[in-house]
Amino acid sequence: MPDRFRVAVTRRLPKACEDRLRENFEARLGDDDTVYTPAALAAHAAGADGVIVSPAEVVDAPAIAALPSSVKVLSTFSVGFEHIDVAAAERRGIVVTNTPGVLTEATADLTMLLILGAARRASEGERLLRSGTWIGWRPTQLLGVQLEGKTLGIVGLGRIGGATARRALSFGMSIAYHGRRPSPEAPAGARFHAVLEDMLPQCHILSLNCPLTPETRHVLDARRISLLPRGALVINAARGALVVDDALIAALQSGHVAAAGLDVYTGEPALDPRYRDLPNTFLMPHLGSATEETRFAMGMLAIDNLAAVLAGQPPKYRVKI
Ligand code: DGY
């Protein structure tokens, strides 16, 4: 037994988290902040008792199989865990943990930014100003959509969806939501729809806030987009693969969807280039949880989870399947 547990970390973490790792573990920190391939991950984890990964690393069944037998815990610096084959990890006796709760408010803030950015044509406004071609205030310039009085439909009203709904209420919006069952996170007055198709025609703004699972992959397809009222906005701060890109892009091109606010993309960091070319998209590079406070809290929680498993204790957040 070494004096201290050995921990491999794939990415740079906030300084306080890296300091804590160095103080408490034999820590092998990611030093170049690149995404690890499965082979690089296995090499980096050689001899490690635990590994901290980011949502950018694909830890599928082959990657799990390649991990050294010393690894007992995979702690992801994220709430999302679709990048990890949890069943394959469990079969190898590796506990998987994640970081829910601490990124709720930051991600809800970002969701509101996407809603406002899409509704008020923020990308077009910024591009106009930066191009140096703005000729001044005009009564009809870049008219957007007012939020007050509109219905926000949320797919997946968990912690983040609930925090987004509370913010939207303060903008004078009403809330509808769809999920498998009524949510304890739903604010008073939010209308639950067991059938997504029943909710869509009411949504001036549709926000995807559900996890990516086999059931939710491509939940927003051409048929469902066609059920939105013309001129609706589509917002995605959850995962890119919730959306069929061809369908959303066609709807943005035709104007059936007036604008989209997106923080996440299929195949990140690549994204369908048509999103970049469309004027009516407001795009962020997966910044939902990117605040100093939240990334610190995520890092500390990822370390707490890992330390608990290595100490033989139940972690605060073990991913269960
Ligand atoms: C998560 O935690 O899953 C986010 O996507 C990263 O902020």
Image (cartoon, rainbow, N blue to C red):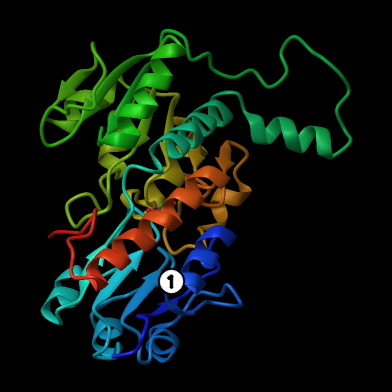
Residue closest to the eye, 316 or 144: 316
Q: Which quarter of the figure is the C terminus placed in?
A: bottom left
Q: Secondary structure at mark 1?
A: helix
Question: Residue at left 17%, top 22%?
Answer: 192
Q: Is residue 18 visible?
A: yes
Q: Is residue 310 above or below residue 264?
A: below
Q: Is residue 108 above or below residue 277?
A: above
Question: Residue at left 47%, top 38%?
Answer: 106
Question: Residue at left 40%, top 63%?
Answer: 55
Residue closest to the eye, 197 or 51: 51
Q: Is residue 49 above or below residue 213?
A: below
Residue closest to the eye, 173 or 297: 297
Q: Residue furthest front?
A: 3
Residue hosting label 1: 24
Q: Is residue 83 visible?
A: no
The amino acid pointed to by label 1 is Asn
